[in-house]
Amino acid sequence: MKNRTYNILFHTHTVSGIVISVALYVIFFAGSFSFFRDEIVNWERNQTVEITDDMQFNVDAVLDTITKTHNLYGRDIELKKYFREQQVGVSIAASKDSVAPEETKSAQFFYIDTKNFKENTYLESYSLGEFLYRLHFFAQIPYPMGYYLSGFVALFFLFAIITGVLVHWKKIVSNFYVFRPLEKLKTMWTDAHTTLGMLGLPFQFVYAVTGAFFMIKLLLVAPNVLIMYNGDQAKFYEDLGYAHPSYQPVYKKLMADVSVANYMEQTQKKWKDFEISEVHIFNYGDENMHVLLNGHLAYTASFNGMGEVIYKAKTGEIVSEKNPITEQSYVEAVKNILYRIHYGDYGGLALKLLSMLLGFVTCFVIISGVMIWLVARDKKNIPEKKRRFNERVVQIYLAICLSMFPITALSFIAVKLVEPASQSFIYNFYFIGWLALTLVFVFKKDNAFTNKTSLLLGSLFGLLVPVCNGVVTGNWLWVSIKNGYTQSFIVDVIVDRYFWFFGLL
């Protein structure tokens, strides 16, 4: 590689990394906890559920409960298991009848508990697990700015990864085995950055690509909609598999009783190991009522086995089906693979733990890259004013990033002490606490103090999380093991031990 090309790639890698560093750190730190989003939510609610996407509850009982409080006749209803928790999402479309009652002319969405059938709005169901999950793609920033910001950060991160590999290509193997902690500071940071960066390279590349795809795909596909589909957005999303078919009501009541649970049982007999995660009912109670069941084969049986079947309620016949074994289109296969490798939900607990570890390793790679940038510019030939400016920039950067560690651990304790913790409480506690810690570290102007204090506080609060859970709920570690409270045990013993582990580092 010519020197000019090398210098261009090196400076491009440095600049792109520095520009996105804070946002990228937040994405990976919050994203590391997002792998355990469901476990954290169930831990908060003192609940334990089966680790499956399958709707293992009485769907008919849920529908009967909803009909008591909502006028469903002729409307489309969707029950969707978004996450592995005790609640299921309920979407009720607006009535298609122009003379229908006023209360049915607007769409509704809520969650319903599948055991006690209590309805909750999204805000009433909010949790720390949901907060951290949404923080990793900046959903707290008004839509769509937060989504686009995280998407472009992922895109620039992909650019930084590619340029970093090209810069280190010749010495990529030899430098991997080199770590010189007793050498000068820049050498130590460079060795750590290179080695850990190579260890996490496949992980980082996957999340850069999939993150950019999820968050800015609307901008990427917009030209295709305009050119290839002549602006027909509905047709475009139908071809991508995002749209459901449409059935019009005939406005005649269906006299026969319909059991959705029977259709589910029939489908799972047809396809072994099929997990139903979505039930869509068209024209509820109407003679033209149809029932769509959507799901996938268990990941132990197939990594990419998406399937769907539609029943006509009046006759019970199958009007359409997509076999999860033999009928996977290229577009659907690619789309589903991107989702699966991003969520990391196909490999069980071991994959989640590995992904969380690699997420924290990436956080260290980001910090070490910034420290390399600072140390490389702390030279006598650089004017004192510029050196002080560079140092101040890094002090602010470290204050913002490292203060996430203790405030996240403290938030686990807060949501246990204040039950149920509302969205406003979580927002105020987390963001105000984060700001307060950041200001303390910024005004202290000491990177060593910022590092030691944040790690010490984070590890201390992390150790107190299972103690707080035991005091408040009685779910001590031995109680969780005895009663089979899997999610509670995972959060107390595994997730929060990451605070302790990295605090010691």
Image (cartoon, grey):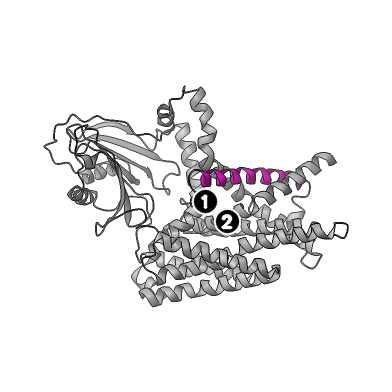
The magenta segment: 145-173
List the single residue furthest toward the left: 255
Closer to us: 28 or 325: 28
Instruction: Give the amino acid at mark 1.
Output: Phe
Q: Position of residue 421 (x, y in %)?
A: 39, 65
Q: Is residue 378 visible?
A: no
Of 239 and 424, the residue lying toward us: 424
Is 43 colored magenta in this rendering? Answer: no
- The question of residue 153 being in magenta is answered with yes
Q: Which residue is rendered at x = 52% and y = 44% of the image?
A: 145
Q: Identify the image quadrant of the N terminus.
A: top right
Is disc 1 surrounded by few (<14), some (14 to 19) or many (20+) residues within 10 Å?
many
Residue at 50%, 63% in the rendered image: 430
Does residue 178 appear left or right of residue 236 in this picture? right
Badge number at residue 26: 2
Residue placed most toward the observer, 370 or 435: 435
Residue 385 x/y as whole percent: 81, 59
Amino acid type of disc 2?
A: Val
Q: Quadrant of the C terminus?
A: bottom right
Q: Please tell me how crowded label 2 is: few (under 14), some (14-19), or many (20+) other residues with Cα within 10 Å.
A: many
Q: Is residue 409 above or below residue 360?
A: below
Place of residue 372 in the rendered image (x, y in percent of width and height, measured from the top left): 75, 57
Q: Which residue is mark 1?
A: 138
Q: Are marks 2 and 1 in contact (CB under 8 Å)?
A: yes
Q: Would you say 175 lies left or right of 252 here?
A: right
Tag 2, which secondary structure? helix
232 w.r.t. 463: above or below = above
